[in-house]
Image (spheres, grey):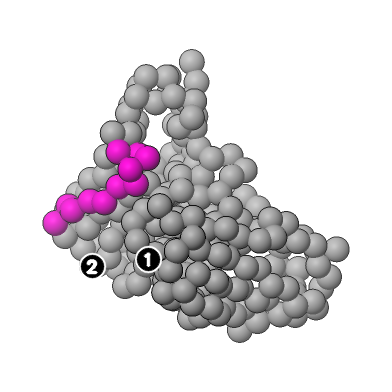
Amino acid sequence: DIQMNQSPSSLSASLGDTITITCHASQNINVWLSWYQQKPGNIPKLLIYKTSKLHTGVPSRFSGSGSGTGFTLIISSLQPEDIATYYCQQGQSYPWTFGGGTKLEIK
Amino acid sequence: EVQLQQSGPELVKPGASVKISCKTSGYTFTEYTMHWVKQSHGKSLEWIGGIIPNNGGTSYNQKFKGKATLTVDKSSSTAYMELRSLTSEDSAVYYCARADGYTDFDYWGQGTTLTVSS
């Protein structure tokens, strides 16, 4: 199975900050990397697919990049509604696997 | 509007089985694969498996083979997941999630909470 290692596991930042979450795959997953946002008590929601493509309705302050084994999610100009846990997920090969999550809090 | 409506919370005894449903609307059911994801309390997400509604073809996470069985009813645009031989380790929230043309989940059900307890 492809392991997805996400860091940091938690992050505290101020409103307006730019934050970066990283995801490292245990083997090459090309560009088949997605990011999800899960707000407390809510379902996961797709933010970014195929490494860098924004899902419909996702604000442009979210961006993704990377290829192969290293990927990043950047949130610029942090907003209160960005408080959530973020997960990466690989779709290169079955079983599709998720990272352990990054819990984002506002200072 | 795409909607995935899951069945309600379940409280079942150890050793029993349960079948969770995911009724879809707002899109052509047979054109997208349907997947199931487990989220244990406070933890990350685990892919259980996926099914191709058009022909019933399935792929499972080896970890859930023998535990989960995925089926569909095309006539009602509903996907099902049956879990058997339940233990406390199966207590979790289970989501159905549609995969779009790539390898991500673009729409999710609201989740079904399964509690296994005597």
B98 lies left or right of B53 = right
Q: Label 2 is placed on what type of residue?
A: Glu
Q: Nearer the viewer, mark 1 or mark 2?
A: 1
Answer whether residue B113 is magenta in the image.
Answer: no
A27 lies left or right of A100 = left
**Residue named by callout 1:** A92
Give the SS element for disc 2.
Answer: helix
Which residues are drawn in magenta?
A: B55-65
Residue A72 location (% of width, % of height): 60, 73
**Separation of marks 1 and 2 at Cα, in angstroms:** 21 Å
At horizontal 50% and vertical 50% (from top left) the residue drawn is B45
**Residue named by callout 2:** B31
Q: Which residue lies furthest to the left in this view?
A: B55
Q: How crowded is mark 2: few (under 14 residues within 10 Å), some or many (20 or more)?
A: few
At horizontal 33% and vertical 34% (from top left) the residue drawn is B67
Q: How crowded is mark 1: few (under 14 residues within 10 Å), some or many (20 or more)?
A: some
